[in-house]
Amino acid sequence: MLIENIEINLDTNKTFEIIDITSKINEIIANSNISNGIVNIFSKHSTSAICVNENEEGLLEDLEFVLSNIISNKFSYKHDNIDNNAESHLKSFLLSSSESVPISNNKLNLGTWQSVFFIELDGPRHNRIINITVIGE
């Protein structure tokens, strides 16, 4: 069994931003010595998320709409007394900081419509770090 660990650095430009990182992960896998196994994608930030879903513009806009209505900026949150970003932290609680995806034939084994996304919840930010761990043979 082989294990490779690589980091991706991203800059974000908006408060809420969804970035498709599927091709970057496939590139990492293609450059690895692993053709079959699993990859874990982990965001090292508590105001961001990693998700697998369909890359359809309306759906991505719907996600922003739903999150902003579930966790509204019209309320006062206790965490805002520290650094005024409680809304971003609360949204990240509803999502996930990581995803694990199978690898087959030296690439992500995703469904037809699936992509891997980094979701920025507290941007814009410089140097967001995503850890990619590829495990397999």
Image: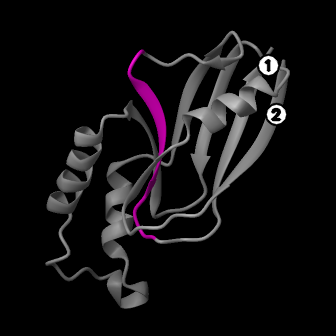
To which quarter of the image does residue 84 belong?
bottom left
Q: Secondary structure at mark 1?
A: loop
The amino acid beneath tag 2 is Glu
Quadrant location, the C terminus: top right
Residue stretch in magenta: 112-123
The image's colouring method is: one colour
| Residue at left offset 34%, top offset 84% | 80
**Where does residue 49 sit, x and y in percent of width and height?**
46, 51
Quadrant location, the N terminus: top right
* Residue 121 within the magenta-colored segment of the rendering: yes
The amino acid beneath tag 1 is Ile
Q: Is residue 130 left or right of residue 125?
A: right
How many other residues sit within 10 Å of disc 1, few (<14), some (14-19) or many (≥20)?
Answer: many
The numbered disc on residue 4 is: 2
Q: Are marks 1 and 2 in contact (CB under 8 Å)?
A: yes
Q: Which residue is mark 1?
A: 34
| Residue at left offset 38%, top offset 21% | 113
**Where does residue 129 sit, x and y in percent of width and height?**
65, 57
| Residue at left offset 41%, top offset 15% | 112
